[in-house]
Amino acid sequence: MKLLIIAGIFIGIIVLYLLIVTLFPGFKVPRQPLAGLRPRPVKTESDFSPARRDVSFDVNGTAVSAWLYLPAQASGPSACIVMANGTGGTRDLLLEGYAHRFQAAGMAVLSFDYRHFGGSAGEPRQLIWIPKQLEDYAAAVEFVRGLDEIDAARVALWGTSLSGGHVITTAARDSNIACVVAQCPGVDGRAMAKTALEKFGVKYILRMLMNGQRDYFRGLLGLSPHKIPIVAKPGNIGLITTPGAFEFFPQHVAETYVNEVCARIIIRGDKYRPIKYAADVRCPVLMQVCEKDELIPVKAARETEKRLGSYAEVHYYPIGHFDIYSGEHFKKAVNQQLKFLNKHLQGQ
């Protein structure tokens, strides 16, 4: 009887806690506007033709918006690279610099926004839900395989950060993928959560978890989502709060960028472990790893390399997570990507 009473009290405390976290006012997280840092429109690469086509495809009845880049001169169906951005990113955040170079090299590119983000439909807005994003990648692949301009046997995947994990997972599930580029890939959510705990401490992590729980249970009850910034200054609540991140984003985002996300991803991100699928991949994988990455543990990338075995081609750079997107580091990384893609997609 005593055990039943103790169990009842314990359950009651948990229920009360969840009711307070879910329904009690006062949990609003201050916004972290990027406008004050003068965000500017995305730059296009003047050396390459910006020609692209607006296209869309459906995923479970929801429209996904995408840009299709086709090479200027093609004697037949082209090889195609399917790409999407990382955490909270949209197709107009840095991806055009890669797409233009692949296009100029004679390859097609499909760059898409996940459902709930950018030009794609989906409610609530700004929802990162990994199973849905993986569905979006698979649907994007099927979409390009059905286009007359695309050679269905030569479809590659490209991802960066969170989507660097998505492309490994997707390739493990689809044996017909020709090759994969995974740039500074997030391959182990559990390892990332452990790193965050060591870096930010228990108090901060508990605050983050409360925000995630609030949004998750509000979603179950059909209530409005609880959102937090995608990128925030160090010490504030946000998905990305590493030093330098808040200064990096305004240099590259478009004026329309929305710096907020449904907080429920906080309590799900550590469950996502693409590293578990690496051994099932049966195509060449280029992994580009930042050795000073502030977000993604290098140890997890090295373990993924082992699991990929002979399919892995890995390059390590003595730089941080955001350094690879600009300047000389970008040029070096994208040139290695072109060499890899030309070899495995174009036979050059």
Image (cartoon, rainbow, N blue to C red):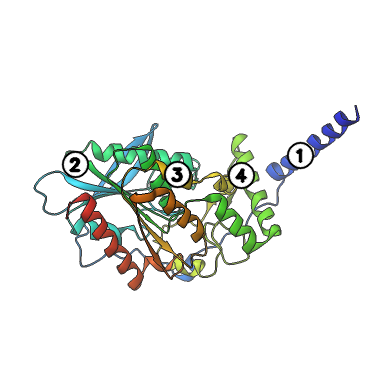
Q: Real-space Cα distance between discs 2 and 4?
A: 42 Å
Q: Of all residues shown, which one is farthest toward the left?
A: 75
> Which of the labelled discs sits on residue 116, or is there none?
3
The answer to whether residue 337 is visible is yes
Identity, as a three-letter code, of the amino acid under mark 2: Asp
Q: Residue at x 11, y 50 (%)?
A: 74
Q: Are marks 2 and 1 in contact (CB under 8 Å)?
A: no
Q: Are marks 3 and 2 in contact (CB under 8 Å)?
A: no
Identity, as a three-letter code, of the amino acid under mark 1: Ile
Dot 2 or dot 4: first in sequence order is: 2
Identity, as a three-letter code, of the amino acid under mark 3: His
**Label 4 neighbourhood size at 10 Å, few (<14), some (14-19), many (20+)?**
many
Q: Nearer the viewer, residue 149 or 305?
A: 305
Residue holding disc 4: 215
Q: Real-space Cα distance between discs 3 and 1?
A: 31 Å
Image quarter of the N terminus: top right
Q: Residue at x 42, y 41 (%)?
A: 134
Q: Are marks 1 and 4 in contact (CB under 8 Å)?
A: no
Residue holding disc 2: 151
Dot 3 or dot 4: first in sequence order is: 3
Dot 3 or dot 1: first in sequence order is: 1
Residue 156: x and y in percent read 28, 47
> Which of the labelled discs sits on residue 14, or is there none?
1
Label 3 residue SS: loop
